[in-house]
Image: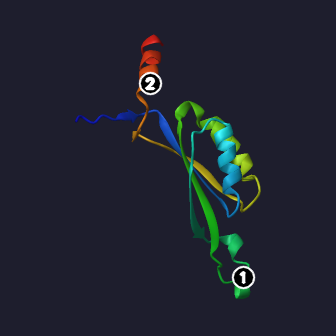
Amino acid sequence: MSREFTILTDVSLITCIVQRGKADVVVQAAQDAGAQGATIYYGYGSGVRERLGVLGLAIDVEKEIITTLVADDQVDRIFERMYFAAELDVPGAGIIYVTRLDKAATHIPKEIVERLSRKRKEG
């Protein structure tokens, strides 16, 4: 049996790090803007805002990290929606950034691959 896969080349990874409890709202905003899905995982970090504990010692704070793979022509729209959904215009709320990818691969249904191939040939 021959196995095939499709390499995606016009894609970027959006990563958004937010305060615990905000990820669901951010993912919903990304999906409403056209993202197909997202991965949420948990971490912790420290910084200037976390130095408010007893005796000025750093306190680890739990974070939610959201990643979503999007087409390059959707990056700006999804990025902006995620930014405002996460309320990143408030100091200490988190950070969002884009990583351009050389290539990515996942299962793509044959009919979608064919449709994309036709579009490329036409335009």
- The residue lying furthest to the right in this view is 90
The residue carrying pointer 1 sits among few (fewer than 14), some (14 to 19) or many (20 or more) residues within 10 Å by Cα, namely few
Q: How many marks?
A: 2
Q: Tell me, yes or no, whether the two marked residues, 1 and 2, touch with CB atoms within 8 Å.
A: no
Q: Position of residue 100 (x, y in %)?
A: 48, 41
Q: Position of residue 21 (x, y in %)?
A: 70, 62
- The residue lying furthest to the bottom in this view is 55
The correct choice, above or below, for 79 with respect to 116 in the image is below
Can you tell which quarter of the image residue 109 is in?
top left
- Badge nearest the viewer, 1 or 2: 2
Which residue is located at x 75 percent, y 53 percent? 87
Which residue is located at x 42 percent, y 13 percent? 121
The residue carrying pointer 2 sits among few (fewer than 14), some (14 to 19) or many (20 or more) residues within 10 Å by Cα, namely few
Task: State which tag comes first along the sequence, 1 or 2.
Answer: 1
Label 1: element kind: loop
Give the residue number, with chain letter if any, for mark 1: 53
Q: Position of residue 78 (x, y in %)?
A: 64, 39
- The residue lying furthest to the top in this view is 122
The correct choice, above or below, for 82 with respect to 57 in the image is above
Give the residue number, with chain letter if any, for mark 2: 111
Label 2: element kind: helix
- The residue lying furthest to the left in this view is 1
Which residue is located at x 71 percent, y 60 percent? 93
The Cα atoms of the two marked residues, 1 and 2, are separated by 56 Å
Q: Position of residue 85 (x, y in %)?
A: 73, 48
> 62 or 100, which lies in front?
62
Circle 2: residue type? Glu
Circle 1: residue type? Gly
* Left-right relation of 25 to 111: right
